[in-house]
């Protein structure tokens, strides 16, 4: 039997022994480029790129008027198409199940193909290059195109959460933030590529996300979580750098929105603005390269440390001795042996265990999570909250038109929603993580506050106060974005990460359900009913087939109903706050940390006892501390 140990003897400072090469000599080498491309942090950058291009569903209101007039639809038909768009974007159960049995690149490749086919067929129909399709076929086209978004989210976002489990709130916030900015990014790019041609915008959202997914398809993968915690591989500092870059990107887009509203831009000016936008979008790559260089230096110092202090080999002759387990280890082994493996149960056993879930925070099976009261309460609250804000976003073009805003202002509303959508996602992700870590503030209670804030936006739309739509678009965008990181983080924390791909997408299913109830059944029908009361039945002059409603009454009743539904959702979410209060007051991330962090049930994780005092103060650890100080210097 051979044991390896690291001796504390040896001379020389590890900083002097390492003597790493200069940054430029390292960075511009093929092997370092390979380290960056296969590293954990480049996966984050690739996810940024994929998710920034995957938010085409949030700019539906820009081209919805063109879709409505080109194909001769009324508002209820348009809202039905919008529902299938939302259904496709959030029906991610299929992508989740595929991701359970295949690597992420398969999910991303399928999503790229679906995006290209679906939106390309919508573009051909709107542009008149194919025969006018029936409504059900247009619904199918947009469902296929929008469903690619769930594949992109599953392939990229779920992978990043599993690669950084201790920072899942921050990861969800920043990644969802880039999705929220995608609407404003698309607006700038299509103005630079095609000018003010909304038909060509549909073509842009057909080919661009597919191309980006194909470029980065092999860089997105799940990586084993390193045993050594606290190193540069899992540091949370780069996420704050990503945050600052994303804030700069949002500020730049906001400035461009204001400037483009005040001045008339030529095509060349739009192109320059888009070029500067692309430069900002690639800034996270600099953070990735810097982080990989720190990892390189860290490994060099460790190699120098081992070279100065080679581990001695101790050989024990004879038969290997039987090592007596401690009483605590025996108890842990007996407790673990009594629990049946969740993946090896038969169908009957799975159904039997479906109503006997583990403790919150442990890995639920899919059936245990779906039938749990916590999931039901969260699902109902999300239906009310997301369904209402999504109805406002999808109808923003018609809302602005009914209240007499010009087309240029409607584009401004869409961009404001996109930017504040980003702000909501980032704020809820980072703030909920900080509040949870420092003050044990439950994410569920923050979700309740977001739902109550959304009611103010709905009431502003219902009242139709002059110029209030600018404020309403800010509130709606912020609240819509803020809900998603909270919902997805709650699912990962309460039900575990083992089947997160499927449970994440099941949580997203609340969006199309809420959209159908509040958008199609409520807003669409009431809008058409108000349009029928107007002179000419609401049809445009000249015999057009576009039914238009003008005035405050067009959406007043709809959004008063939506505001009431959102209040009901906030009250329902309080039930989840009460049920998970004691859970969030514990240490929910203990099992992902090194050493002996206590779990939320108060017991130590298996195999993670306290380190002996002599080990903590050994010369080896002192030398490692010296190496870390040299690295930081």
Image (spheres, helix red, strand yellow):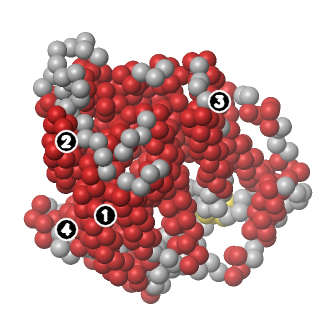
Of the numbered discs in the image, which one, if any, rests on residue 611? none
* Mark 1 or mark 3, earlier in chain: 3
Above or below, comparing residue 81 to residue 505 in the picture = above
Look at discs 2 and 4 and give the one toward the viewer.
2
Secondary-structure class at tag 4: loop
Q: Residue furthest left?
A: 348
Where 323 sits versus 87, above or below?
below
Q: Nearer the viewer, residue 216 or 293?
A: 216
Tell me if label 1 and label 4 are in contact, CB under 8 Å.
no
Evaluate whether residue 622 shows in this view.
yes
Residue on which disc 3 sits: 276
Q: Residues within 10 Å of mark 2 (few under 14, many from 20)?
A: some
Question: Against 616, is 50 above or below?
Answer: above
Point out residue 459 in the picture as x, y percentages from the top left corner: 36, 61
Alpha carbon distance from label 4 to label 3: 49 Å
- State the separation of the CA atoms marked 2 and 3: 47 Å
Percent from the top left, x then y, of residue 386?
33, 57
Q: In the figure, residue 613 lies in which quadrant?
A: bottom right
- The kind of secondary structure element at disc 3 is helix
Q: Residue at x 35, y 82 (%)?
A: 578
**Mark 1 or mark 4: whose residue is earlier in sequence:** 4
Q: State the CA–CA distance, disc 1 to disc 2.
A: 26 Å
Which disc number belongs to residue 563? Answer: 1
**Disc 4, disc 3: CB below 8 Å?**
no
- The residue at which mark 2 appears reads as 534
> From this viewpoint, which residue is outermost toward the bottom?
327
Q: Nearer the viewer, mark 1 or mark 4?
A: 1
Report, in whole angstroms, how far the alpha carbon at label 1 lies from the one at label 3.
40 Å
| Image depth: mark 1 or mark 3 in front | 1
The residue tagged 4 is: 371
**Image spot of residue 216 (x, y percent):** 48, 31
């Amino acid at each position: 039997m051979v044991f390896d140990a690291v001796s504390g003897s040896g001379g020389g400072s590890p900083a002097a022994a390492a003597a790493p090469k200069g940054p430029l000599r390292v960075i511009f080498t093929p092997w370092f480029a390979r380290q960056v491309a296969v590293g954990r942090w480049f996966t984050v950058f690739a996810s940024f790129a994929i998710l920034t291009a995957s938010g085409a569903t949030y700019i539906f209101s820009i081209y919805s008027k063109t879709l409505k007039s080109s194909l001769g639809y009324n508002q209820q038909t348009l809202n039905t198409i919008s529902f299938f768009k939302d259904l496709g974007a959030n029906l991610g159960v299929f992508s989740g199940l595929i991701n359970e049995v295949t690597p992420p690149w398969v999910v991303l490749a399928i999503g790229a193909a679906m995006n290209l086919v679906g939106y390309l067929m919508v573009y051909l129909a709107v542009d008149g290059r194919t025969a006018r399709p029936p409504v059900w076929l247009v619904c199918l086209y947009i469902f296929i195109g929008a469903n690619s978004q769930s594949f992109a989210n599953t392939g990229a976002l779920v992978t990043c959460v599993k690669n950084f489990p201790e920072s899942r709130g921050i990861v969800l916030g920043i990644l969802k933030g880039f999705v929220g900015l995608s609407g404003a990014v698309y607006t700038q790019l299509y103005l630079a590529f095609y000018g003010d041609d909304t038909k060509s915008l549909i073509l842009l959202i057909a080919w661009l996300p597919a191309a980006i997914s194909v470029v980065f398809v092999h860089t997105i993968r799940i990586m084993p979580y390193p045993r050594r915690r606290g190193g540069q591989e899992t540091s949370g500092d780069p996420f704050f750098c990503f945050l600052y870059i994303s804030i700069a990107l949002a500020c730049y887009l906001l400035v461009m929105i204001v400037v483009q509203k005040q001045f008339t831009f030529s095509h060349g000016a739009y192109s320059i603005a888009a070029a500067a936008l692309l430069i900002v979008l690639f800034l996270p790559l600099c953070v990735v390269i810097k982080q990989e260089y720190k990892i390189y230096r860290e490994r060099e110092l460790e190699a120098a440390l081992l070279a100065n202090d080679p581990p001695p080999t101790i050989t024990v002759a004879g038969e290997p001795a039987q090592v007596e387990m401690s009483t605590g280890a025996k108890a842990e082994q007996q407790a673990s042996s009594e629990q049946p493996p969740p993946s090896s149960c038969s169908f009957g056993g799975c159904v039997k265990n479906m109503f006997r879930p583990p403790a919150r925070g442990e890995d639920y099976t899919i059936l245990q999570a779906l039938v749990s009261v916590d999931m039901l309460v969260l699902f109902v609250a999300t239906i009310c909250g997301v369904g209402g804000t999504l109805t406002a976003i999808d109808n923003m073009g018609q809302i602005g038109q009914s209240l007499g805003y010009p087309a240029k202002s409607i584009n401004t509303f869409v961009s404001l929603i996109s930017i504040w959508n980003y702000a909501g996602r980032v704020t809820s992700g980072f703030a909920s993580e900080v509040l949870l870590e420092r003050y044990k503030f439950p994410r569920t209670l923050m979700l309740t506050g977001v739902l109550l804030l959304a009611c103010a936006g709905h009431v502003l739309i219902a009242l139709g106060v002059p110029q209030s739509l600018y404020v309403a678009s800010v509130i709606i965008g912020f609240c819509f974005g803020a809900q998603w990181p909270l919902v997805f983080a709650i699912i990962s924390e309460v039900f575990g990460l083992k089947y997160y791909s499927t449970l994440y997408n099941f949580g997203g299913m609340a969006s199309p359900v809420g959209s159908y109830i509040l958008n199609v059944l409520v807003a669409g029908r009431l809008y058409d009913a108000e349009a029928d009361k107007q002179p000419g039945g609401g049809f445009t002059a000249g015999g057009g087939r576009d039914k238009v409603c003008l005035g405050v009454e067009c959406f007043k009743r709809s959004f008063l109903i939506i505001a009431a539904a959102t209040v009901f959702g906030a009250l329902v979410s309080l039930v989840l706050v009460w049920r998970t209060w004691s859970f969030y007051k514990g240490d929910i991330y203990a099992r992902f940390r090194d050493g002996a962090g206590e779990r939320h049930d108060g017991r130590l994780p298996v195999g993670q006892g306290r380190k002996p005092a002599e080990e903590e103060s050994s010369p080896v650890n002192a030398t490692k501390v010296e190496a870390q100080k040299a690295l930081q210097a």
